[in-house]
């Protein structure tokens, strides 16, 4: 598969969904790491980052034909950043990714807790026999913990 035909590649997200490969997301992620590291994005650095993105895309097209897991994309980015002598940028990228993973986990925990309430799971709605679990204020209290 060539770099030009990467649009035929699908990405398996963490939740199992298949989405179309978007090379722009790789560019944005690396740019965000650069801004996080240096506070700005100069024209000179844009050229360097563009070359790194092209290397990432070439590696993906060389190794994958139909589907790729999101963590494989992240590993390729990290490896090539380090290989290109951009270890500080790689560390910032990893830090950004870990932060996003934590926020995603916390969001899923909230969604899980909310779904337990809306599905009227007995262990949640019968927590206190003195309160009516159908009342909004009680539901709010139950979601707050």
Image (cartoon, rainbow, N blue to C red):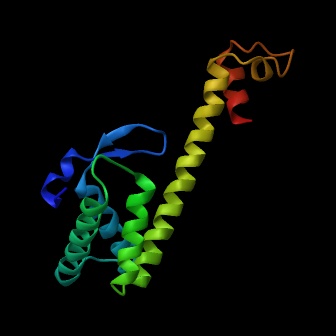
Q: Quadrant of residue 79?
A: bottom left
Residue nearest the observer in this picture, 23 or 33: 23
Q: Is residue 133 left or right of residue 64?
A: right
At a point 43% along the width and 70% down the height, the residue shown is 93
Q: How many marks?
A: 0
Give the answer, above or below, for where 122 lies relative to 98.
Answer: above
At a point 23% along the width and 66% down the height, the residue shown is 58
Identify the image quadrant of the N terminus: bottom left
Residue nearest the observer in this picture, 98 or 18: 18
Give the answer, above or below, for where 84 lies relative to 36.
Answer: below
Identify the image quadrant of the C terminus: top right
Q: Where in the figure is residue 140, as x and y percent of width and height?
A: 66, 27
Q: Quadrant of residue 25?
A: bottom left
Q: Is residue 43 left or right of residue 11?
A: left
At a point 48% along the width and 69% down the height, the residue shown is 94
Q: Is residue 38 left or right of residue 103?
A: left
Q: Residue furthest bottom?
A: 85
Q: Residue furthest right?
A: 129
């Amino acid at each position: 598969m060539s770099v030009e035909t990467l649009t035929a590649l699908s990405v398996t997200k963490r939740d199992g969904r298949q989405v179309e490969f978007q090379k722009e997301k790789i560019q944005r992620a690396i740019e965000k790491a650069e801004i996080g590291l240096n506070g700005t994005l100069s024209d000179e650095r844009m050229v360097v980052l563009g070359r790194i993105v092209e290397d990432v895309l070439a590696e993906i097209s060389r190794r994958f034909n139909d589907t790729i897991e999101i963590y494989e994309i992240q590993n390729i980015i990290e490896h090539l950043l380090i290989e290109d002598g951009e270890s500080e940028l790689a560390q910032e990228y990893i830090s950004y990714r870990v932060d996003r993973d934590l926020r995603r986990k916390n969001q899923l925990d909230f969604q899980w807790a909310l779904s337990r309430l809306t599905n009227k799971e007995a262990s949640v709605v019968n927590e206190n026999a003195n309160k009516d679990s159908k009342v909004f204020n009680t539901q709010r209290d139950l979601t707050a913990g």
